[in-house]
Amino acid sequence: MQMDKAGHFYTAAHLCEANYRLFEWTGLSKRTSAWIGAGIGLGFQTSLEFLDGTNAQWGFSWYDMLANTLGAGWFLGQQTLWDEQRLLIKFSYHLTEFAAYRPQILGATFTERLLKDYNGQTYWISFSPTQFIENCKLPTWLCFSFGYSAEEKLVGNQDFYVAANRTFQARRQYLFSLDLDVRELPIKNKWLKAVLRPLHYLKFPFPALILDGNKMTGSWLYF
């Protein structure tokens, strides 16, 4: 399913951006801040991988490192090419029924499920057409969003599981939805804009089309 790798990619990209903004705020150039931010973000993720390498239960993962590196590259590539982040990596979550079957693995509380239940996690790429299409008439804050998630994923290293006389077969899900870029909302108050800015890490609820295996479904409001 590779949802864990999507999480590594997402975390690395946003760690790089957060450090970039910190160093740009100090007065460094955007280019220098971008390289420092990418280095710190990737360095932090790498240190966690080395810590995992000392844990007999987890161990060091080259695939995790690849996802971390790609996330840092995603950030740095956009800063180099466009001097901004046009393709936004976002996250959304909704509660599912599956955690109840393996609460020790998928979480017993909301916070645990948020981190462990891949079935409720969705990772998105959101972008505004106005940033790529000249004279586009759509609002600059309106985004198209493509998502990736999993369904009936109860065991990390296998796709088939039986519990409580029920058979679970893990599947990938691909989604299309709309989204908001809070950075482009017509808000004049700079303090309010600063408070709302971190929300561009999260996907806003909208109707969505869901490709689940060979079946296309929809949701009137997908979280």
Image (tube, grey):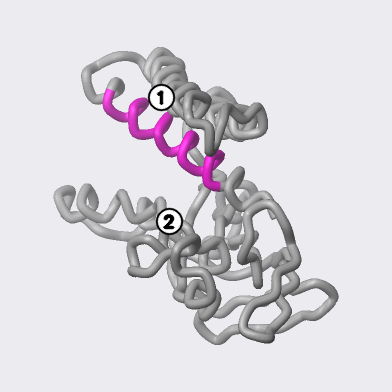
Which residue occupies 44% across, 19% down? 43
Any part of residue 140 in sight: no
CB contact under 8 Å: marks 1 and 2: no
The answer to which of marks 1 and 2 sits earlier in the sequence is: 1
Q: Position of residue 211 (x, y in %)?
A: 74, 73
- In the image, residue 168 sits, relative to residue 72, either above or below, namely below
Q: Which residue, given by chain and number where applicable, does mark 1 sit on?
A: 44
Tag 2, which secondary structure?
Answer: helix
Q: Position of residue 161 (x, y in %)?
A: 70, 69
Any part of residue 61 in sight: yes
Question: Label 1 sits on what residue type?
Answer: Phe
Q: Position of residue 59 (x, y in %)?
A: 56, 30
Name the image quarter holding residue 111.
bottom left
Which residue occupies 56% across, 45% down? 87
Question: Label 2 sits on what residue type?
Answer: Leu
Name the image quarter holding residue 210.
bottom right
Which residue occupies 53% across, 40% down? 8
- In the image, residue 196 sits, relative to residue 108, either above or below, namely above
Which residue occupies 50% across, 65% down? 179
